[in-house]
Amino acid sequence: MKKYFFPLVKNPYRSKDIFKAIKVLKTGKLTMGTNVLNFEKEFSSKLKTNYSLMVNSGSSANLLAIQCLINPYRKKRLKIGDEIIIPSLCWSTSLWPIVQSGLKPIFVDIDKETLNMNLTDLEKRITKRTKGIMLVHVLGNSTDMTKLLKIKKKYKLILIEDTCESLGAQYKSKFLGTFGEFSSYSFYASHQISSGEGGMICCKDKSDYEIIKSLRSHGWSRNLSNEKKISNNNPHLDKRFIFYNSGFNLRPTEIAGAIGRSQFKDLFKFKKIRNLNRRNIINLFKKNKKINKTIKVIKPNKFVNPSWFGLPLIVNKKNLLKNIMLKLEKNGIETRPIISGNFLKQPSVKKYGLIKKIKYKNADYINNHGFFIGLPFNKIKLNILKKIEQSFQKSV
Ligand SMILES: Cc1ncc(COP(=O)(O)O)c(C=O)c1O
């Protein structure tokens, strides 16, 4: 494996996180339990979400949100072919649950200054069949939420916030992920906090919460608020094994619950240090003429108090991106595309016949000019900052 002096992510687990995991291991009960339950409660209380359920990944959270929308127990259920709007700069599993659930994704362009959904393009793509928006908050930043909420209200759209990259970010002091009917978070290793793999799905409505809870665990009636009633209505069944809904098994392990909970306690400490690291790198870039001429930093959008886990950068000059990324990698800095660039360029999208003739100019621009480097949750030491500057100096 290649050795970087500045990787995208270092081992994110501290002794106290590992200790919590060992404690769970010693109980012999690794399946979802009190740590997961307490994590969900603490998550709701800190971020002010109505209902939170932990799952085994951010992808599972997106899948559950979309599956809930088409579920027969939902009063206003979406129908096959209903349209969901999604930015062309998105992750694989922001998109695929829409298609896998028989809904139709409608792609819109982004703003290259914020990496987030372009709201003029969004409004242009709304049709009579548009029922919802899968909004992706990219890398701790967000679009203009005031304007977005106006559009949501005007067209009566359901909002799903894919907040997998933006845990702890705020828009006008309100946490991203608390604006829509549903939101998803990811605790993957490189994200704001990590539980190894893991995620959270939040929703506004109690009835959606009940559907998601059942879908998460095989479709079971266990722990639903109407569990008793379901059991009374089905006296021919063992009340512990009643399958009330269709289902998946998307539950997290108790170990993930314990690690996630331990990391979540320090979310705002991590956010603060990452912001400081970001400022320190930017200050170095500003003072270096060569770097400053070639590299532009993505800034937080107006009213956004961002929560970064990476530093998204733009190469100002044409056709230089690949070369610069290669050189940075050679000089010890790990890099990667912004999300996965314009997702419409992926072979899977072509295979499923989703490609349209429409040009997504800004997503293409980010695809061809953007990349990001990591931002650790520990303060970057001065000697490493110097090395970062030297590597960039040699690479641009
Ligand atoms: C925007 C976005 N949505 C969803 C996901 C999926 O999260 P997970 O890796 O936890 O499944 C990711 C993963 O990085 C992501 O970037």
Image (cartoon, rainbow, N blue to C red):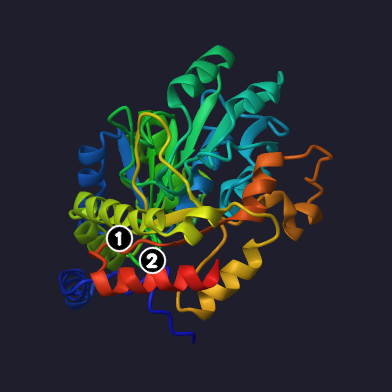
Q: Which mark is on residue 32?
A: 1
Real-space Cα distance between discs 2 and 1? 20 Å
- Residue 335, which numbered label? none
Foreground of the two, 165 or 327: 327
Residue 189, disc: 2
- The quarter in which the C terminus is drawn is bottom right
Which residue does the image show at 43% across and 34% down from the upper left?
301
Callout 1, which amino acid?
Answer: Met
Q: Residue placed at 59% from the left, 67% from the top? A: 324
Q: Is residue 211 above or below residue 150?
A: below
Q: As drawn, is 209 to the left or to the right of 246?
A: left
Front residue of this view, candidates 389 and 199? 389
In the depicted structure, whether residue 85 falls above or below residue 96: above
For residue 194, say whether it is visible: yes
Q: Position of residue 344 (x, y in %)?
A: 72, 49
Name the amino acid type tagged 2: Ala
User: Which of the marked residues, 2 or 1, is nearer the chain's N terminus?
Assistant: 1
Q: Secondary structure at mark 2?
A: loop
Residue situated furthest bottom in the rendering:
1
Instruction: State the SS at label 1.
Output: loop
Q: Residue, x 47% and y 43% (percent of image)?
A: 244
**Label 2, residues with CA under 10 Å away: few <14, some 14-19, many ≥20:** some
Q: Quadrant of residue 229?
A: top left
Judged from this view, the residue extending furthest toward the front is 289
